[in-house]
Amino acid sequence: MNSLLARPLTGSRRGFLRWLLASAAPLAVGCAQWKEIPDPDGKRGLPAASIADEAAVLDVIFWPVPYEASSDLFDGPHDPMSLLWREVDELAIDPETRQTLAHNGLQAGRIEHIEQWIERIGLPRPSDASEQLMQQASVTSEIANSRHRLPFRSGQQQEFAIRKTSASNQSVLFRQGDHSVGRMLIQPQFLLTVQARPDNDGRVRVRCWPRIEHGPFRQSYVSNDQAIRMNSSRDSWMLHDLAIDLPLNQNQTLILAPTADPFGLGKQMLTDLRPDGTHERVVILIRLARKPEPSL
């Protein structure tokens, strides 16, 4: 090889060398540009899809509220829910629904500027990295602890898991007025269905109701003009009597929470005994982040 390099360059070798250097130059420049130009937003992947003007945007938040907190809101440790609930307009919920919720250990209403309360009361933070990892893997809690911002077209429904599927069978009791319905459910999972549609007065009417999936998965076949597909689903218990129908203005929030002394469905859905022996409760918030903008 050294002897080849030591030999004088002929015309053909000089031409080949010039062609080799010219071919390598764009590659070298391209490598330098790839390394030097940063990603403009610090993000990778596909750009976010645009949201249609006629869609409302809702924040759906499962907020773990501590039983005791210290902040500038109160003197010493205090239950933040007792103070938060003073700001909730429960009369925004119709009386019949409010009574049915109360009979099942739930309370609901409308509140302004919930983001300020979340910031001041705060969110429970893991004490160390291992606890944080367990929390992310849903090992330390059965209840959802998440935030979602989603567009909703008129009448569109979205479903959210309130808590994980139970590993055992549970007895569920639902009270409607003077009547009670009790059922033993196989590995139930509590879900929340949310729907939004524009109201005539410019507000957005948000409707939500819980349902419970239970029992084994059953397979069925659904056909259309193009294909036949297999569908797998479980039995579902719709709790339409607990449906909340509430008009919201910009930044207003529907709040659904267990009662001060949890019992019944409110206790089963929104409270839990953690592995470390501490009690946990979660409040569901549905906030109108953006009103729809009808096209002209």
Image (cartoon, grey):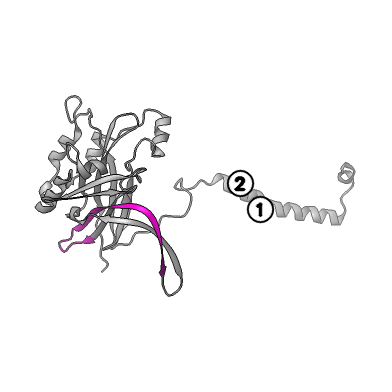
Choose top left, top right, bottom left or bottom right for residue 73. Answer: top left
Residue 165 is situated, as x and y percent measured from the top left of the image, at: 35, 46
State how far apart marks 1 and 2 are (Cα). 10 Å
Choose top left, top right, bottom left or bottom right for residue 19. Answer: bottom right
Residue 119 is situated, as x and y percent measured from the top left of the image, at: 26, 37
At x 28%, y 50%, the residue is 59
Residue 229 is situated, as x and y percent measured from the top left of the image, at: 44, 66
Between 40 and 129, the one nearer to me in the picture: 129
- Tell me which label, 1 or 2, sits earlier in the chain: 1
Q: Is residue 41 left or right of residue 197?
A: right
Q: Is residue 206 magenta?
A: yes
- Residue that mark 2 sits on: 32
Q: Which residues are magenta?
A: 197-222
Q: Secondary structure at mark 1?
A: helix
- Residue that mark 1 sits on: 26
Work out which quarter of the rendered image holds the C terminus and state it. bottom left
Q: Is residue 7 above or below residue 67?
A: below
Between 65 and 209, the one nearer to me in the picture: 209
Is residue 232 visible in the rendered image? The answer is: yes
Q: Amino acid at mark 2?
A: Ala
Choose top left, top right, bottom left or bottom right for residue 139. Answer: top left
Q: Residues within 10 Å of mark 1 (few under 14, many from 20)?
A: few
Q: Is residue 204 left or right of residue 91?
A: right
At x 14%, y 46%, the residue is 103
Between 103 and 202, the one nearer to me in the picture: 103
Work out which quarter of the rendered image holds the N terminus and state it. top right
Q: Is residue 209 magenta?
A: yes
* Secondary structure mostly seen in the magenta stretch: strand
Q: Amino acid at mark 1?
A: Pro
Between 54 and 140, the one nearer to me in the picture: 140
